[in-house]
Image: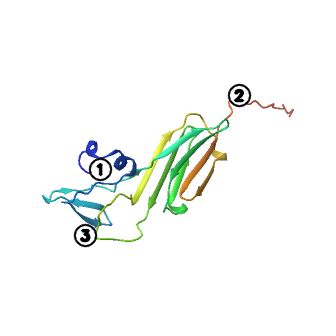
Amino acid sequence: MFGNKDKRSFFERITGSISVSDDDSIVDDSQYGTKIISHDDDWLEKSEEEVGELAIDVYEKPNEIIVQTMIAGVKPENINIDIARESITIEGRRERQTETVGNNYHTKELYWGSFARTISLPAEVDPDNVEAFEKHGLLTIKLPRIDKNRTQKVKIRTI
């Protein structure tokens, strides 16, 4: 992302945010994303738009797997959820509401732009019966497990 990834804090890695020192100035270029100009005028720029990684919680109930993530400020039409039997991908984009240019920031921790997260699920799920809802910025996705022990009788027809 910006320089050596190992130098980013845990918070910066999970939210996709960047650190800004007192000696750095920020130039916001909405076509290519935010760039940082250091006090040495060395560019640490993105070659393509960065995608932030969502922080998630995944837990199990007897008949379902629950995935939760904070999506405050994201419109439902800007979120895409793809589910396979063994994985889930959540993608979206958080649009900036106001623009501040130059050195007017004192702290810049909120992540604006694209985000995504793909995880492997601990058990197979039924993608056709998934429920997703948002309340107070918390997205909750309920993934019903596939019951591998379920059997069904099949009648044989005569033709």
Instruction: Compute the Cα span from label 2 to label 3.
Output: 61 Å
Amino acid type at image mark 2: Asn
Helix, strand or loop at label 2? It is: loop
Residue 96 placement, left or right of 102: right
Instruction: Estimate the x, y position of residue 140 in percent, counting from the top left.
Output: 58, 50
Helix, strand or loop at label 1? It is: loop
Do tag 1 and tag 3 residues touch (Cβ < 8 Å)? Answer: no
Q: Where is mark 1, residue-wise?
A: 1
Instruction: Depth check: give the residue in front, 87 or 41.
Output: 41
Amino acid type at image mark 3: Gly
Residue 62 placement, left or right of 31: right
Mark in front: 1 vs 2: 1
Helix, strand or loop at label 3? It is: loop
Q: Judge the density around disc 3: few (<14), some (14-19), many (≥20) Cα neighbours within 10 Å.
A: few
Q: Judge the density around disc 2: few (<14), some (14-19), many (≥20) Cα neighbours within 10 Å.
A: few
Q: Which mark is residue 102?
A: 3
Mark in front: 2 vs 3: 3
